[in-house]
Amino acid sequence: MRRIAVVAMFVLVVGVAAFYARGGGDAKPLPGEPLRAAAKSRGIELGTAVRGDVLATNRAYRQIVAAQFSTVTPENEMKWALVEPDRGDLEFGPADDIVKRARDAGQKIRGHTLVWHAQLPGWLNDLGAGELRQATREHIRAVVEHFSEQVGVWDVVNEPITDRGGLRRSVFLRRLGEGYIEDAFRTARTADADAKLYINEIGAEGIGPKSNRLYEVVRGLKARGAPIDGVGFQAHSNLDGLPGDFVANMQRFKALGLDVAITEADVALKLPASEADLRAQAGVYTRIVRACEAVRCASLTFWGFTDGRSWIPETQPGQGAATLLDGDLRPKPAFGAVQAALGG
Ligand code: G3I
């Protein structure tokens, strides 16, 4: 009898452990109106970056993504190195999985990203100018066509400007010259007549050398009739907040007849974060929402929603706690602040 009880207990413990190891637990309900509903009543698409591996294995993470956000951006799964690790060998599985889950949850998808200097496959470096131009066009066409039914917005060119206002000396600029940007937009348009095509930039929120150069690039594209529809401001931030002229900066891009979106917002803190830091962070999030509303942004996307899955501590030692929920998916002051700013 005692032996049976011991075996039963063992089976139970192993079962529960396996359940949680697979991420099988439900999410604790978050208080108040879901963010996506509050945002909808304000006419804002509210999004988050997602990690495909976590989405597939962690049920609580998945539930929160579905309940709280109306649009998702694959954080890495559509990037060149992952989609085309060998030339012409297209691997869409992980991105397809995110897209399917998003569709099931009634969400839109931001495609991220087609031409960027980072997360490139090694084989690109071996190509001369002609081959690189060809491979870039083939890549854009293949990816955009594959997702044309599901992805309505693409970050076509990502981070082409340096902080000092030059063009970033990526492999594309060095081999193909500045025209690679326009070529990327024209190629994307041939692959999808309807998708919104964006240029997406980091650290260009305030008016200054970087955003001024971005403005010149975008104005040039428009003047030449290139098919660009929008400008994404990533809005990675910290307790310094975003520059006071963020709204004015976005307005001048809008005045060119473009959509503007906030595409990767987060607010990094020095670790360990104090209660005061968390409250100050909530204030920065409030201002990000207000900035988006002030320009009638096309969408507001956070770069992840839980501190347990955020690029900040992974790449910036000593920094973190940048998102709306803590590592256990519990709401931080920033969550309530975003909800309140959206009127929820
Ligand atoms: O998938 C591999 C895994 O197999 C391996 O074991 C592990 C070991 O380091 O690395 C994993 O790949 C990492 C990948 O994220 C997935 O987690 C890469 O090393 C890591 O470099 C990569 O970082 C991403 C980063 O872009 C790359 O530059 C971040 O997750 C992602 O959040 C970040 O996103 C960028 C936007 O695309 C553009 N704007 C800036 C933003 C933040 O850097």
Image: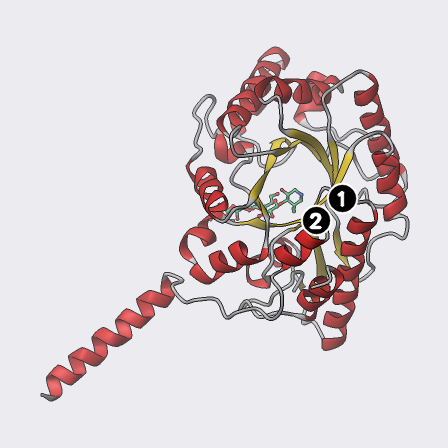
Q: Residue 28 vs residue 253: left or right?
A: left
| Residue in the image at 62% along x and 25% along y | 194
The picture quadrant where one finds residue 159 is top right
Quadrant housing the C terminus: bottom right
- Give coordinates of residue 211: x percent, y percent: 85, 37
Q: CA distance from mark 2 to mark 1?
A: 7 Å
| Residue in the image at 45% along x and 42% along y | 100
Above or below for 152 versus 26: above
- Give coordinates of residue 238: x percent, y percent: 76, 59
Q: Residue 306 vs residue 22: left or right?
A: right
Question: Disc 2 residue type?
Answer: Ile
- Give coordinates of residue 236: x percent, y percent: 73, 51
The picture quadrant where one finds residue 231 is top right
Query: Which residue was labeled with disc 2?
Result: 44
Instruction: Of the two numbered discs 2 and 1 on the same chain, state the one appearing first in sequence.
Output: 2
Above or below for 3 versus 144: below
| Residue in the image at 52% along x and 46% along y | 106
Query: Which residue was labeled with disc 1?
Result: 297
Question: Disc 1 residue type?
Answer: Cys
User: Of helix, strand and loop, which one carries label 1?
Assistant: loop
Q: Are marks 2 and 1 in contact (CB under 8 Å)?
A: yes
Above or below for 22 versus 95: below
* Residue furthest out toward the bottom: 2
Q: Residues within 10 Å of mark 2 (few under 14, many from 20)?
A: many
